[in-house]
Amino acid sequence: MKEEKFQPKGKTIQELSEFLKTLGEPAFRGMQIFQGLYKHKYRTWEEFTNLPKPLRAKLSEYIELADLPVGFHMVSEDGTQKFTFKLEGGKEVEAVWIPRGDGARKTICISSQVGCTLNCSFCATAKLPFQGNLKTWQILDQVLSVERIVGDHATNIVFMGMGEPLHNYFEVMRAATILHHPEAWNLGAKRITISTAGVVPGIHRYIDNKEPFNFAISLNQPDPNTRSEIMDVNEKFGLDKLIEAAERFVRELGRTITFEYVMIPGVNMSDKHIQLLGKIARKVGNCKFNVIPLNTEFFGWTRPSDTMIEDFVTKLKSASRVPVMNRRSPGKEIGGACGMLALSGTNNS
Ligand code: SF4
């Protein structure tokens, strides 16, 4: 078995049961291993006290339960913690623990790819070479390790770390499904957010599959003529098609869609942009905006001042008549804020 490198992490209950059957064990052991890994968070076979001792011994002999090794771990004054994880061949990915001040919301932002093939101008990950998709277990291990190290449980998971989640659709949805499973993390579907930069075919696939998770589009520029200047993905999938997909999401799934918006002074915060955003909101209907100040300083861009942010939010609320959430950007000094993953503390910087 060692030669086959069976990795029990990231497997469904059915796959684990099939594997257990090959060892001459009853199928229900698959559920016990699934619960052990993701409900009880066991890290060694010895801890699986829900399994008979001889089976534990057999599994220990053949299958190593390795964790994704942690590289850097940085803690910000505001409580945000950034982690890097080491993969084979010197690759690294990052995850961020983001507690909200009152402790009610504890979010882990996780990565789905090593690097990214999209080239969003404001994003540090875009400056890295793309090195591949993460496996389900590598996505889930980020959550397991972060929770273990901080000694707490996440209330929310967002796929907004390194990579475009819809470019790794199968593994991302599989990971989200395990996070949602009652015999694993049991996180509500609304507490798991998948975010895309605008991969339109992936959005239609998401709708066709009726995926239950929260869904966000990183919009960032409502002007169809200039969106490609900051987001390459727009050249392939134009803004009109993206908005059509958002409309279909709302119409067919009957749920709210979130537009993420990185505020960049001189690029996307003018009155004209606000009017265009209002138009999009009226077209899509059931939507909301999460606005985030720019955290990187590429191309000489600067972060908007607090006054600019307040003014933008007030005007956008009035133009769109939908909720506009001004997301604080924690973890800036440790490179853990939005758009900063890969900026500091890793070998990739
Ligand atoms: S913002 Fe997201 S999609 Fe765009 S380059 Fe960065 S990681 Fe990729």
Image: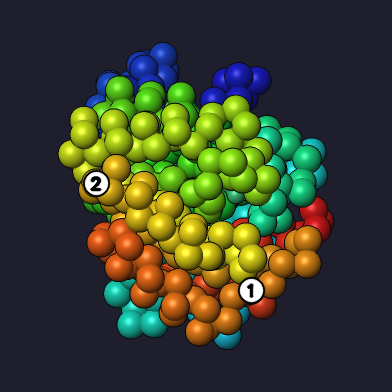
Disc 1 marks which residue? Answer: 303
Q: Position of residue 4 (x, y in %)?
A: 60, 19
For residue 28, above or below residue 333: above
Looking at the image, residue 125 sits to the left or right of residue 10; the answer is right
Residue 99 is tagged as: none
Question: In the image, which is nearer the foreground, mark 1 or mark 2?
Answer: 2
Disc 2 marks which residue? Answer: 285
Residue at left offset 66%, top offset 77%? 333
Please state which amino acid type lies under the numbered disc 2.
Gly
Residue at left offset 64%, top offset 66%? 266
For residue 259, above or below residue 60: below
Name the one closer to the observer, 235 or 150. Answer: 235
Name the one closer to the observer, 213 or 293. Answer: 293
Q: Quadrant of residue 313?
A: bottom left
* Figure quadrant of the C terminus: bottom right
For residue 325, above or below residue 250: below
Q: Position of residue 183 (x, y in %)?
A: 25, 43
Query: Element type at marker 2?
Result: loop
Q: How is the image coloured?
A: rainbow
Query: Element type at marker 1?
Result: loop
Q: Position of residue 201 (x, y in %)?
A: 46, 24
* Figure quadrant of the N terminus: top right
For this orientation, the residue located farthest to the left is 254
Looking at the image, is mark 1 or mark 2 earlier in the sequence? 2
Please state which amino acid type lies under the numbered disc 1.
Arg
Crowding at dot 2, Cα within 10 Å, few <14 / some 14-19 / many 20+, comes out as: some
Circles 1 and 2 in contact, beta carbons < 8 Å: no
For residue 103, above or below residue 187: below
